[in-house]
Image (cartoon, rainbow, N blue to C red):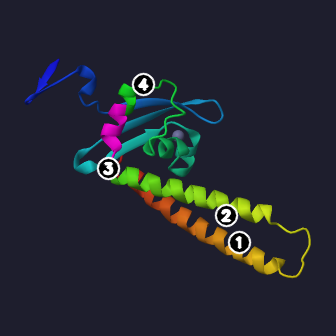
Amino acid sequence: MIQVGETLLTRSELPENPVVLEVRGEDGRHHTVVTERLRGGKVRMTCTCADSAAGGWCRHRIELLCLRYDALLERTEELEFHFEDLVMGTPLADLADEVDMALSDYGQALEALERKRPAAIENGTLRAIAALADDLADAARQLDRALDRFRQRLAGAPM
Ligand SMILES: [Zn+2]
């Protein structure tokens, strides 16, 4: 037990900063996500995957920030506790939620359009397709904006 102020904490309750997590990508490769809490509620979060290098963001970080741990190689309550201690309630976590919702809306709009894709041009189909295309355009713009904000926030805490 370690005394911090008035309270006694077990070692696992002490803040850990940074937190290093290993995730398995969809391609089976392993990536390392390092999360560090900086001053002023800023969070620095990096991932070693190719998507991160190419696009400035990746789904591994979105998943973790949305507190979904399915991709973790080693899942322990202690690691999750330490991670959540660093990210919960931060602007980065809020933006990740926004991106997560926008990704899902975009995926649904894309699917809806593909499902309704008509074989021929018949009466009424063009109007229906136009409405679905409008939905897709809206979803794409929302996702684009959400990703911009997320990338900027990630880049705002430089290495
Ligand atoms: Zn990644």
Identity of the residue drawn at 42% across and 56% down: 95
Which SS class for mark 3?
A: loop
**What mark, if any, has residue 53 been given in the picture?**
none
Q: Nearer the viewer, residue 79 or 20?
A: 79
Q: Label 3 vs label 2: CA separation? A: 29 Å
Q: Is residue 159 visible?
A: no
Disc 1, disc 2: CB below 8 Å?
Answer: yes
Q: Quadrant of residue 21?
A: top left
Between 109 and 34, the one nearer to me in the picture: 109
Q: Secondary structure at mark 1?
A: helix
Residue type, numbered disc 1: Leu
Magenta stretch, residue numbers: 81-89
N-terminal-most mark, 1 or 4: 4
Determine which residue is flagged by label 3: 89
* Amino acid of disc 3: Gly
Gap in Å between the C-alphas at discs 4 and 3?
21 Å
Label 1 Cα crowd, 10 Å radius (few <14 / some 14-19 / many 20+): many
Asked whether mark 2 lies closer than 8 Å to ligand 1, one says: no
| Number of numbered discs | 4
Task: Residue under label 1, please give it.
Answer: 132
Task: Assess whether residue 86 is covered by the magenta stretch.
Answer: yes
Q: Residue at x 58, y 40 (%)?
A: 50
Q: Which residue, given by chain and number where applicable, does mark 2 sit on?
A: 109
Spatial distance from mark 1 to mark 3, Cα to Cα? Answer: 35 Å
Mark 1 or mark 2, which has the lower sequence index? 2
Query: Taking the image as drawn, is residue 111 in sight?
Result: yes
